[in-house]
Amino acid sequence: MTLRGAMLLLLLALAQPVRVLAHALDPAYLELSILDAGRWRVTWRVPDLNGTPMPITPRLPDSCETNDAPGPHFDGRGWSTAYVVNCQAGLFGGTIRIEGLENTRTDALVRYETAPDQAVIRRLTADQPGFVVPADPGHFEVFTSYVALGVTHILEGLDHLLFVLALLLLVRNARRLIWAITAFTLAHSITLAAATMGWFNLPSAPVEVVIALSIVFLAWELAKPPERRDPVAERLPALVSFGFGLIHGLGFAGALHEIGLPERDVPMALFAFNVGVELGQLLFIAAVLAIGAAARRMVPLTARHDRGVTCLASYLIGSIAAFWVIERINGF
């Protein structure tokens, strides 16, 4: 592949101190859980913005009366609060809106229960900061909502994207690259489905560490000359990507577990979320290859120094991933 020069530009952007913007770009989260007839527990989490809560506020249907809501507290990443509302007329037919969301670059996830333990997820954006709660959400609405959630999750998951980027840099042969991406997709689809269905469960903290370590491994191989790389990684990259894809799938499952699944449409929601993840992954790959093709024409010098660019990229990828390893172990 001769697209490495432009990929390096993308890496440099990822390597910038993204923590300053990370909180501001995190999604807000609103959850409404049924307590009893007419009463709902509201959980509201808003991103941090320069040490203060982002100025967005949930607005519930007009029939809802809010008791005294405590002020939000900082949990190390965002601002959270919980309180009880009385909605004697229920939520159906009412409007839920995140006021101020239209002035931000973030999204908001709204999870509301239609019955005890039966929840629906909606994703709100700056272009669509509110919605009318339908009496009976249809299958199409569930499908489109979870596809959007899958796309959002993969495009906001820098660790997953960095793994795919390292794979693009490492695998030179187009056929092997296609097989490697396919194996990665198949593997994380398997573990995503298995973990979500409850067939097995692993703690999220060590899973996140291994995900970061998988990126360190690819960066280590990328730093070596091709003739000195591990034979398995060089000749059978699909096998390597499949193995690490199983771990990445557990990471996707952890995110989906936090979002929740509608009890009546679990298979459809799971399938839709996975479709969204794949669409987001393909969008990222297409964007990287397009940037690379453009840069190859505008900066032909990068093709003549391909090895040096690749080596520098490997150190940037490895440094970011190693930092994540230390940070995540420290968070145990």
Image (cartoon, rainbow, N blue to C red):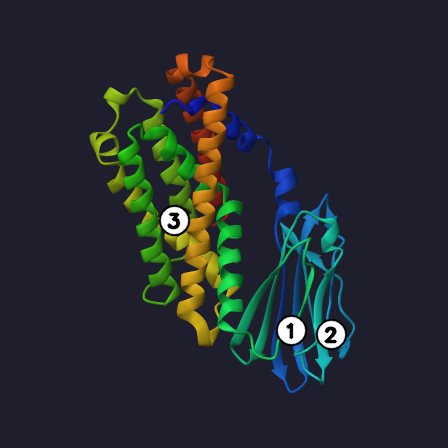
Disc nearest the viewer among 2 and 3: 2
Specify the label residue 133 is tagged with: 1
Q: What element carries label 3?
A: helix
Q: Tell whether 207 sits left or right of 138.
A: left
Outermost residue, bottom side? 37
Q: Please, what is the three-letter code of the amino acid marked with disc 2?
A: Pro
**Mark 2 — residue?**
61
Disc nearest the viewer among 1 and 2: 1
Pointer 1 and pointer 2: residues touching (CB < 8 Å)? yes
Q: Is residue 329 visible?
A: no
Q: Tell whether 126 sits left or right of 18.
A: right
Q: What element carries label 2?
A: loop
The residue drawn where x is 48% and y is 44% is 328
Q: In this view, does 69 lie above or below 51?
A: below
Q: Please, what is the three-letter code of the amino acid marked with disc 3?
A: His
Q: Crowdedness of circle 2 by 10 Å Cα count: few (<14), some, many (20+)? A: some
**Residue 2's spot in the image, x, y percent?**
39, 22
C-alpha distance separating marks 1 and 2: 9 Å
Pointer 1 and pointer 3: residues touching (CB < 8 Å)? no
Specify the label residue 284 is tagged with: none
The residue drawn where x is 52% and y is 77% is 118
Q: What element carries label 1?
A: loop
Q: Nearer the viewer, residue 202 or 155?
A: 155
**Residue 31's spot in the image, x, y percent?**
62, 68
Does label 1 or label 3 sit earlier along the sequence?
Answer: 1
The residue drawn where x is 50% and y is 48% is 331
C-alpha distance separating marks 1 and 3: 34 Å
**Mark 3 — residue?**
248
Q: Which of 282 and 20 is in front in this view?
A: 282
Q: Tell whether 113 sits left or right of 242.
A: right
